Image (cartoon, helix red, strand yellow):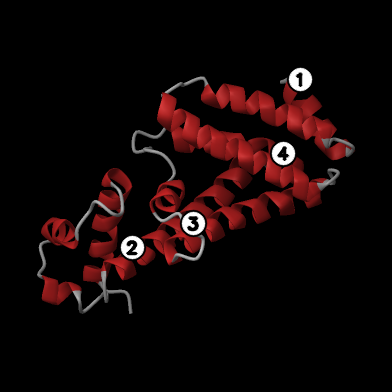
Amino acid sequence: MITPTRERLVEAAVRRFYRDGFRSVGIDQILADVGISKTAFYKHFESKEDLMLAVLETQNRWLQDFFQKMVRERGGETPAGQLHALFDVVDQLIESDDFHGCIFVKVAMEFPLPHEPAHVLASQSKKTIEDFVHALSVDAGVSDPRGLAQELCLLMEGAYVTRHVSGNRRTIDIARRMAQLIIDTRCDSSSVCATRAANSAQ
């Protein structure tokens, strides 16, 4: 059962872990933010790791819902249009005042062993995004849809990291140009080419 106190713990932990890192933040800091005791904490979570995994699951649900919703809103009705809208969503994420890099990249760096639960959740989140892009690529009729999905996701990851590390506001412009080149190489479908032509004419 999700209780108000559990929600407050997760919300406080999201802010702390995202800003300060997963290993460096102690339970006492989160408890101070929420204003509860350790006894109350252990009624909701067995450990810091349990809380950390709940944070990652919550963030993953938010990201998947946000990403898919915004791609469809920005890209319109066609899968081809939605493919082209991927980097509109990346732009919105990286230009947010709250953006400090990708939380899943951060946790994978802090827990680098592939069998660690936090690393597994980070990997699964990235795979879910890739599968979404792959489905769009299949529906758009491009050649080698899995290859296109992998290439575009690699480019998105590069945009997240480059914008965070360098602060370069031109990062998204570079990423858009590269994405267009990548899509063009797979563009043996009239739907993709037609979408590009329509966008260029506007």
- Dot 4 lies on which element? helix
Residue under circle 1?
A: 201
Residue 14's place in the image compared with 120, above or below, is above
Residue 129 image position (x, y, % from top left): 60, 52
Residue 178 appears in the rendering = yes
**Which amino acid is tagged 2?**
Met
Graded by Cα atoms within 10 Å as few (under 14), some (14 to 19) or many (20 or more), the crowding at tag 4 reads: many
What's the distance in space between the residues labelled 1 and 2, CA to CA? 48 Å
Q: Which mark is residue 81?
A: 4
CA gap between label 4 and label 2 equals: 36 Å
Q: Amino acid at mark 3?
A: Ala
Q: Mark 3 or 4, which is nearer the eye? A: 3
Q: Nearer the viewer, mark 1 or mark 3?
A: 3
> Which amino acid is tagged 1?
Ala
From the image, state whether disc 1 or disc 2 is nearer to you. 2
Estimate how packed mark 3 is, as few (under 14), some (14 to 19) or many (20 or more) residues with alpha carbons within 10 Å: many
Question: Which residue is denoted by mark 3 in the rendering?
Answer: 122
- The spot of residue 188 in percent (x, y) is 90, 37
